Image (spheres, grey):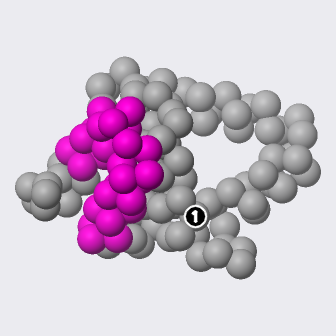
Amino acid sequence: MQKDDVENYFRIIEEIGEYGSHIPDRLKSFSTTSNREEGTLPKETKHLIALAIAINIQGSGCSAVHVNDAIKSGCDKHAVLETIGVAALMGGSRTIKNSKEAVEQLARITRHQPAW
C-alpha cells in the first residue's frame, strides 16, 4: 500500500463524516450494519468479510486497509491469512495483486513473514 493510498483513504473517511453530519440517521444506519458495530455478526467477522470483498472487487490499497481494520478489531493473523486464502481461491488469478498486498500488509503490521 502506498502512502498516498492511506492518505486518500483517511481523506475520504473525513469527507464521509462531514457529509454524514447532514444525514446522521442514514449514516448511523450504515454504520450499524457495517463493520463498526456488533450485530448478529461479531465485528471481527464483518471485518474479515470486508477484507474478502476488497480482495475480490476493490482497487489497490483497499485490501491493506481492511487487513488493518481486521487486526484492530481483534482478529488474529491466522484468521486474516485464512480469509485472504479463501478470497484468493474464490477470486482466482484476478485477485493475485490484492491478495499479495494483503499478505504484505499483514506481515508489516504483525512483524512476521507471510506464512505461505
Q: Nearer the viewer, residue 30 or 51?
A: 51
Residue marked by disc 1:
46
Whether residue 37 sits left or right of residue 53 in the image: it is: right
2 falls in the magenta region: no
Q: Nearer the viewer, residue 91 or 20?
A: 91
In terms of image quadrants, where is residue 38?
Answer: bottom right
Residue 81 lies, in percent from the top left, at 29, 62
User: Which corner quadrant holds the C terminus?
Assistant: bottom left
Q: Main secondary structure of the magenta part?
A: helix
SS at circle 1: helix
Q: Neighbour class for label 1 at 10 Å: few (<14), some, many (≥20)?
A: many
In terms of image quadrants, where is residue 70?
Answer: bottom left
Q: Residue at x 13, y 61 (%)?
A: 115
Residue 19 lies, in percent from the top left, at 79, 31
Instruction: Write the start and end of the magenta stretch as one range.
Output: 77-104
Identity, as a three-letter code, of the amino acid under mark 1: Lys
